[in-house]
Amino acid sequence: MSEILSIQAPPQSRSDNRGELGISGEALAAEFLEASGYRLVLSNFKVPIGRNSRGVAVTGEIDIVAVDADTLCFVEVKTKASTGFAEPLASVTVRKQRQITRTARIYRRIFGLTEMPYRYDVVSVVLEKNIEPSIDLVKGFWSERKFRKKVWTGDIY
């Protein structure tokens, strides 16, 4: 008997405004970056970056990779429908920063860009209804320094 019985319901299309909102925000951010002199290289770069504490495989993503003058920029785009609860930058948590940093290291290694200067930027986009979109760029939002492992010298404090 080669038939397979499936009791799983067929996938249903759900209306997920967050996905559409994010796509719109990334498109606006890309236009904004180009108008600001950035050269866009790649969007939505995804790569496996290891395993979490429970052993589950983790995939990292960088929304936009661009070049500003001679600096490689890894850009996180955060889009919100309003700022009533929190600003978009509040969503760029330390955990998210660590994940992007790990992904950027792999990107630089894959493409042989280990000697090129780089930084981590964030573009916040607020798309409120009936209002012109608000787009802000924060250059160098975080640095990789805070994620480097500390060396223990044996000193007791």
Image (cartoon, helix red, strand yellow):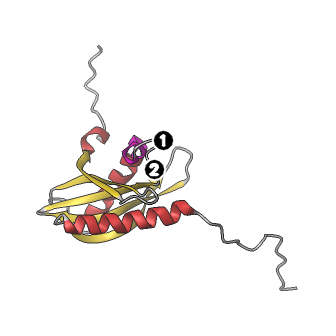
Q: Do the residues labelled 2 and 1 touch (CB within 8 Å)?
A: yes
Q: What residue type is labelled 1?
A: Phe
Question: Which of 105 and 75 lies nearest the eye of the viewer?
Answer: 75
Q: Which residue occupies the foreground of this view, 52 or 95? A: 95
What residue sits 62% from the left and 66% below the top? 15
Picture disc at residue 82: 2
Quadrant that contains the N terminus: bottom right
What span is in magenta?
88-95
Residue pictured at 29% horizontal, 13% vertical:
157
- Please provide percent x and percent y for residue 103: 36, 57
Residue sitting at the far right: 1
| Drawn side of residue 5 relative to residue 61, left or right | right
Query: Residue 145 appears in which quarter of the rendering?
Result: top left
Secondary structure at badge 2 equals loop
| In magenta segment, residue 9 | no
Q: Does the magenta stretch include residue 93?
A: yes
Q: Mark 1 points at which residue?
A: 85
* Element under disc 1: loop
- Name above or below for residue 64 compared with residue 136: below
Residue 31: x, y in percent?
A: 28, 69
Badge 1 crowding class, 10 Å Cα cut-off, few under 14, some 14 to 19, many 20 or more, is few
Would residue 74 be found to the left or right of residue 14 on screen?
left
| Residue 33 vertical placement versus 125 (above, below) | below
Magenta part mainly helix, strand or loop? helix
Q: Please give the name of the residue rendered at 36% of the width and 60% of the height, measured from the top-left corner.
A: 132
How many neighbours does mark 2 have within 10 angstroms: few (below 14), some (14-19), or many (20 or more)?
Answer: some
Residue 99, position in %: x, y? 40, 51
Q: What residue type is labelled 2?
A: Ser
Q: Disc 2 to disc 1, how far (Cα)?
A: 8 Å
Residue 26, position as x, y percentages in the image: 38, 65
